[in-house]
Amino acid sequence: MYSKTNIHKVEFFRQIVEFASDSIVAIDTDLKIIFFNKEAEKTFGYSSDEILGKHLNTLIPSRFHESHNNYVTQFAKSGVIARLMNETANLEVMALRRDGSEFFVEISIIKIKEAFVSIVRDITNRKAFEEKLKFYAERDYLTGVMNRRKTEETGSKELERAKRFNNPFSILVLDIDHFKKINDSYGHDIGDLAIIHLTSVVQNVIRQIDSIGRWGGEEFVILLPEVDDQGISVVAEKIRSAVEQQPFITKTKKNVDFTISIGGSTYSKSNASWESILKNADLGLYKAKKNGRNRFCYYDS
């Protein structure tokens, strides 16, 4: 029999578990829920009375049922007593609320005799913060398109894909003609709005598989998978024409017309590195500027 001291200890630990700040869910070897603390009730939306005896799958999105059940079975057979599921399984763990909404969780699972105890922590806010950090690490702060580092990374990957499958790949480099005059005449805030306007026009013209990145200042790089040395001029002309024809009207109703110059180059055996394609596209841009601006020039080494 338990002594009074042991009974007090059991009650003491039960109270700690019951009112812990993390959700604590215990299941038996049949994966049926046998304990559900107060925080779990708040997190999942079920009362303890209605969830006890239900299968663990009740709290897991259906697409994860098989993998999650297999994980618990493997854990049961292992000699490990406790494990952080996210690290060991190397996967994103999702949970399911009563209302059908899904959320990210971190799960520590502990083996206790004939039961498993899961300590579940809602990490939705942490995941959102991580995604936000990732976005700002890869995106240009002004336009929201890829920043220079991400553009270079994506361009290099697209080039490697083109080499592997022997597919065409082209890039465009463009910038706003006489951009300094816009800043000097209307101010840098209008200059920023002009850059945002340009980005919007380009995104409406290019395909979904294409991508645009801000290379610096008013200069942009556009990645064109599956576009060869014939198609690149068609794409470039569409972009140039769209920018010329869509007026940029500021908040104060000022109509600030501007044009762009574009240079382009295409992957080939003699132009087989990211650096060489970019350099040649840049030389094409220089040629377009020299020949009068508001035009596209192709450069092939």
Image: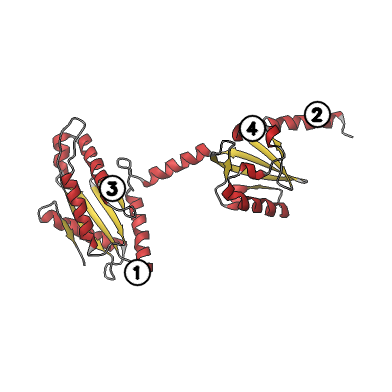
Where is 112 relative to 278, above or below?
above
Structural distance between the alpha carbons of marks 2 and 1: 73 Å
Colouring chosen for the image of the structure: secondary structure
Using a 10 Å C-alpha cutoff, classify the residue at mark 4 as few (fewer than 14 neighbours), some (14 to 19) or many (20 or more).
Answer: some
141 shown above or below 70: above
Q: What SS does tag 1 mark? A: loop
Earlier along the polypeptide chain: callout 1 or callout 3?
1
Name the residue nearer the viewer: 300 or 230: 230
Q: Position of residue 128 (x, y in %)?
A: 47, 39
Labels in figure, total: 4
Residue 210 location, quadrant: bottom left
Q: Name which of mark 4 and mark 1 comes first in the sequence.
A: 4
Distance between mark 1 and mark 3 Cα atoms: 27 Å
* Secondary element at image label 3: helix
Instruction: Identify the disc placed on residue 203.
Output: 3
Identify the mark nearer the N-term, 2 or 3.
2
**Toward which corner of the image does residue 141 lie, by quadrant?**
top left
**Residue drawn 87% across the image and 31% down it:** 3
Residue under label 1 = 166
Q: Which residue is mark 2?
A: 8
Q: Callout 1 environment at 10 Å: few (<14), some (14 to 19), or many (20+)?
A: few
Q: Secondary structure at mark 4?
A: helix
